[in-house]
Amino acid sequence: MLYQAYELQRASLAPMRMFASQALSLLDMPCNPFRPTTVGRLAVAALDSFEHSTRPFGKPEFGLKTTIVDGSEVDVTEEIVATRPWADLRRFRVHAARPDAPRVLFATLYPASGVRGASIARPISPGAPAPAPGGPPFKPAPALFKSTDAGATWTKLAATGLASPPVGRQALGVVARSGGRIVLAGLDDGLYRSEDGGDSWTRANRDPRIMPVGVITD
């Protein structure tokens, strides 16, 4: 009922608004002798106020193209799900990554020895002589890599604080809904935690009874 009353008022004022617009154009002409007079300025101000107050204005766009979800910028699509004579019902769809297809991935190269105790051979560059037998055992330096594009590219992290060797296979766990910022790692001397995406680590527990075998996050 209120919407019909509003539309009736707007339709009844439409001819008067058109008359005010035309009269305003005539009074505002530079060659009009009444323009600089007091009566002319008052008439222009009154007609201009009436014309603007009765003019129907379109609604501006929301302009919501992206938003932040779990620390990552994702795209937003505006959709019209229902149309009525007085308004449109709009929905903003967030194109976030599926839980089973994360974009933040971690990979570790942290071996202390080979699989099941087998020794790891030192890599030999083409043309370089083979290492002499009986030399010191080769221990690769630990390395932690991170990808933010679902594994397309990888960046080596500083991993400050991860000096302890792993327990068997390296166990890493990313806390859900943290955008890849909070990561847990199970090492030989306990559980470690990173809150900056794996760049720096601190020991999360010092209870000798708790020795990590795997890492499960939620």
Image (spheres, grey):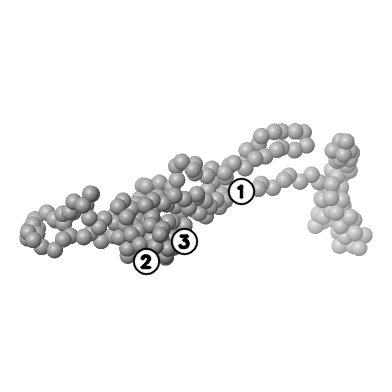
Residue at figure coordinates x 38%, y 51% from the top left: 214
Element carrying mark 2 = loop
Q: Is residue 70 left or right of residue 123?
A: right
Instruction: State if disc 3 and disc 2 touch (CB < 8 Å).
Output: no
Tell me, yes or no, if residue 41 can be seen here. Answer: yes
Image quarter of residue 45: bottom right
Q: Is residue 88 left or right of residue 75?
A: right
Q: Earlier in the sequence, mark 2 or mark 3?
A: 2
Residue at figure coordinates x 43%, y 60% from the top left: 193
Residue 7: image x %, image y %?
Answer: 85, 38
Instruction: State if disc 3 and disc 1 touch (CB < 8 Å).
Output: no
Q: Give, as a three-letter code, the residue at label 1.
A: Leu
**Residue placed under numbered mark 2 in the picture:** 161
Residue 153: image x %, image y %?
Answer: 35, 50
Residue 164: image x %, image y %?
Answer: 32, 63
Q: Earlier in the sequence, mark 1 or mark 2?
A: 1
Q: Quadrant of the N terminus?
A: top right
What is the crowding at mark 2: few (fewer than 14 residues within 10 Å), some, or many (at least 20)?
some
Q: Earlier in the sequence, mark 1 or mark 3?
A: 1
**Residue placed under numbered mark 3 in the picture:** 195
- Residue 208 is labelled as none
What is the crowding at mark 3: few (fewer than 14 residues within 10 Å), some, or many (at least 20)?
some
Q: Given this view, does label 1 or label 3 mark the residue nearer the observer? A: 3
**Residue placed under numbered mark 1 in the picture:** 64
Image quarter of residue 190: bottom left
Mark 1–mark 2 Cα distance, whole angstroms, equals: 41 Å
